[in-house]
Amino acid sequence: MIHLERDKKAALVSIGVTAFLAVIKYFFGVLSGSIALTADAIHSVTDVISSVGVLIGLKISGRKPTKAFPYGFYKAENIVSLFLALAIFYAGYEIILTSVEKFGTVVLTNLPFAIAAALTSLVFTVLLSRYKLKVGRELNSPSLIADGKHTQADTYASTAVLLGLLGYYFGFSSLDAIAGILVSVFVFRAGYEILKDAIKVLLDASISYEGLNRIREVASGTYGVRKIRSLKARSSGKFMFIELEIETNLKDLERAHQLSDKIEEQIKSEIKNVDRVLVHMEPEEKEFMRYAVPCTENKGLSSKVSGHFGAAEYFCLFDIDLRTADNELTDMRFIKNPYFALERRKGLKAAELLVTNKIDKLITKESIAQKSAFYVLEDAYVEFEETDAATIEEIVEELKA
Ligand SMILES: [Zn+2]
């Protein structure tokens, strides 16, 4: 909350100071007849309008979505900006026109007042830009920093105005009109900045790379997300809409649904101004399937399949390549069952051992349904199959067929 309030305070201070400067520049600009000073007043007005416009736009865009506008009114802000930009371009054009028309024929009166006004403007603009940059950096607010940089550049316009007036004082009468043309460049720049941002949002441009990376980081850190297939995010006004396509190993619909809720929650708590997160889930694309079979011995393919699960001396683990047409065997190894002689809980311990070896399917002679081992394995999404085969080789042959 403190964060938002300082942000807002800086914006209001900026609007207040700029409006005050616009008034004194306009007053003394007209009084003295200085084109440049009047032009800079118009420039300040465009800066105020763009700041106020954003605030007004926020009011409209804050309206709740309706049936006819299910995605809300966020872009209203950017449509307002579009019209503002056009108005600002027109102001820049008018300044150039006046400067050219009056070139060489400028007659200034009340020069000391005009110089004092220009000097005041320069001093306040410098202070204002420093203030906005300082607060912006402290709050890590990109919009406030950008605004501070804009004001920093505006000090060149104020300097040009001051030099134009001083030049007139020393007998270079056309310097005021030249400064006027220079100021119009700043007006055009203000218009261009507003136009660019508005068009980006209206055309659904992506958010920044840093923003995307941050979202990717948060989403992939959520348990159950195996891979992020695609990520899209766009701004609409001040708000963000995110579309995420993920791979998960969760097979249960209920759990998958909980996962998507969790991802949304995480993103919204870590990143500001997120309106909506749409999560599309796909089952994890498996390249191989890992089987486990309890054995009585460690003799490669000819090993005998054990009739027991927890009491088996060995487990044969092998991988079947799912990308090949004939289910090729790619890897085979035996792990000793250190729990086979235990009095109690040997099945449970063996099940935990297999889970840490990331098996996908368990093939047994005896059914382990309803035993504690069964629940451990089921919890890790392991599948089950019963077999009559005597050796590992027979099982592998059956899988190939
Ligand atoms: Zn400006």
Image (spheres, helix red, strand yellow):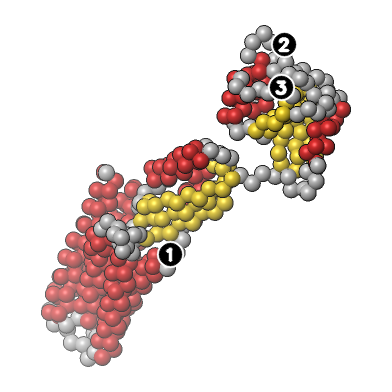
In front of the other: 33 or 146: 146
Contact? badges 1 and 2 (CB < 8 Å): no
Q: Which residue is painted at 27% across and 56% down in the image?
A: 64
Identify residue for label 2.
Answer: 341
Q: Quadrant of the C terminus?
A: top right
Query: Which residue appears farthest toward the front when viewing the image?
Result: 388
Please say whether residue 124 is visible from this viewpoint.
no
In the displayed structure, does residue 79 sit left or right of residue 339?
left
Q: Which residue is painted at 84% across and 32% down in the image?
A: 393
Q: Amino acid at mark 1?
A: Asp
Q: Helix or strand or loop: what does disc 3 sit on?
A: loop
In the displayed structure, does residue 72 sit left or right of residue 116?
right
The x and y percentages for residue 209 are: 49, 56
Q: Which residue is painted at 19% across and 70% down in the image?
A: 22
Identify residue for label 3.
Answer: 366
| Marks 3 and 2, how far apart at CA | 18 Å
Please say whether residue 296 is visible from this viewpoint.
yes
The x and y percentages for residue 230 are: 54, 54
Q: Helix or strand or loop: what does disc 1 sit on?
A: loop
Identify residue for label 1.
Answer: 204
Q: Which residue is painted at 31% across and 77% down in the image?
A: 86
